[in-house]
Image (spheres, rainbow, N blue to C red):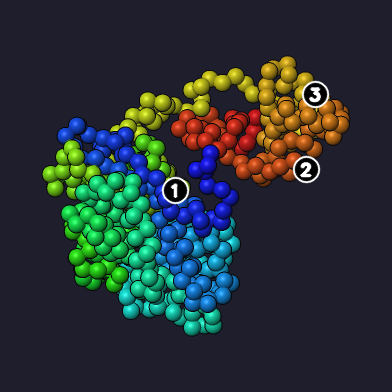
Amino acid sequence: MSGIQKISAIADTIGNTPMVSLSDVEGIGAPQHSAEFVGKLEYMNPGGSIKDRVAKHIVQQLDKQGVAKDALLVVAGPGNLAISLSMLKRKLVCLIPERTSSDRIRLLKASGVTDIVRTLDGALPGSPEHPAEIGRRIVDGCPGSVYVDEEQGLWDLEECYKELASEILDQCDGMVDALVLGVDTGNAATHLSKALKAAVPRVQIVGVEPSNSAIGEQNIVNPLARRWLCEDIGRAYAPRALEPGAIDMWIQVSDPVAYSMARRLIKAGVHSGTSAGASVAAARMFAASAGFCKGNRVVVIIGDTARNYGDTLLSDEWMLAHDLLDVHMLGDLQRKQLGQYRGASVEDLQLPAAVTVNSDDPVGAAIALMSENDFSQVPVTGAQRRLVGYLTLSAAQALIDSGAASPSAPVKQFMLKFAGSSGGSISRNRYWLITPETPLSDLARFFETHSVAFITDASRKF
């Protein structure tokens, strides 16, 4: 028990993230002659990403500069740095690209950040739309505020990434043949390359970017031609923080490959985001091209958590709509859907006729009806037999037993009411119309977030 960390400030829990084998990931676990792939789980930092490390060092530098703790920080980036700074109790204005998932926006808002400016994907340095230019205009209008990003070289992050490199070397006992990581600002790639090569000169640093990104090309191109979905990595130009020679090999990964591999990582228990999917896929490509075999070890930076991507990576519907599942995963999903439902609808279930109570019926009669029919709930109808809500046996019985309701009280005073109906109620639930024609696939999706369904017709009548 002596090795367990005592109660501490959240900043003190940043770092010392675990490293795990990726052999259980489909497509990675390979024959005995293959290289070893391991993942450095940076998403297990308290804020869910590698940017916790960066935020901690930026805050330390702000404190040394005498910047007030309540000073406004104007933060540019895909969102993880802002989340980390918010976790460290800093007041923020966030400049976040359009590509960033809504999950991170919601998390920032829940953290108390109210000022979020969406910026143009692929805006070039010096243009009015670039986050640095927008940030400077905001800072000019807010005395005492500070502009924060990783791209402009305003922060000394060498020690930040030296710490990460030291952890990698310790966990691998110095046996690292390659490091694979997604590249955005270039800071991690530059500083990790220096630190690791100082200790292990032969180590290969592999930079990963999305297809259509231009970082590896080391030049500026038309940003309108540079579009991708994978978040947190890639740029339409080479960032100034990336030092020439830091990367030994560049690999571009398409969106479908990145997202599909991210799904495979999640299935294997590594709950990481899309940039990790791209990096793991690139690690496999690199090892094959380099002729790595048993005895070679490839370390992959697993940058952030899958929980940032509830509306995208974690949504089957979104993945299908954007054609991001590879042929094997697409086939598995289609076979699952067809095998489960085969196009059937609710009508094919041949359910018995519904038993209902009227909203004016006494609660005692509703309890008796449910007990007699062994029901846990009963739908409640109003005028013209329109569905207005439902009553649960457990709640109704508890109301009677506690004296909060008498058996003669009308059901409408205690029913759970659907949105759109009238009268008093305990609570209001969103109404999702389910009819005999509703596909069973839609009904299954309904039950992902609800516990009970009542079948009605299009006019909500029983």
Q: Secondary structure at mark 3?
A: helix
Q: Which mark is residue 32?
A: none
Three-letter code for the amino acid on which mark 2 is drawn: Gly
Q: Relative to 405, is 92 above or below? A: below
Q: Residues within 10 Å of mark 2 (few under 14, many from 20)?
A: some
- Report how far apart the C-alphas of labels 2 and 3 lie in the structure: 19 Å
Instruction: Determine contact: label 2, label 1, CB under 8 Å.
Output: no
Kind of residue sitting beneath label 1: Met
Residue at figure coordinates x 30%, y 63% from the top left:
191
User: Relative to 76, does residue 230 appear above or below in the rendering?
Assistant: above
Regarding residue 120, the answer to whether it shows in the image is no
Q: Which residue is mark 1?
A: 44
Q: Can residue 345 be seen at all in this image of the molecule?
A: yes
For label 2, the residue is 424
- On the image, the x and y values in percent for residue 335 come to 33, 29
Q: Earlier in the sequence, mark 2 or mark 1?
A: 1
Residue 264 position within the rendered picture, expressed as x and y whole percent measured from the top left? 33, 39
The percent position of residue 423, horizontal first and vertical second, equals 77, 43
Q: Which residue is mark 3?
A: 365
Q: Position of residue 445 (x, y in %)?
A: 49, 36
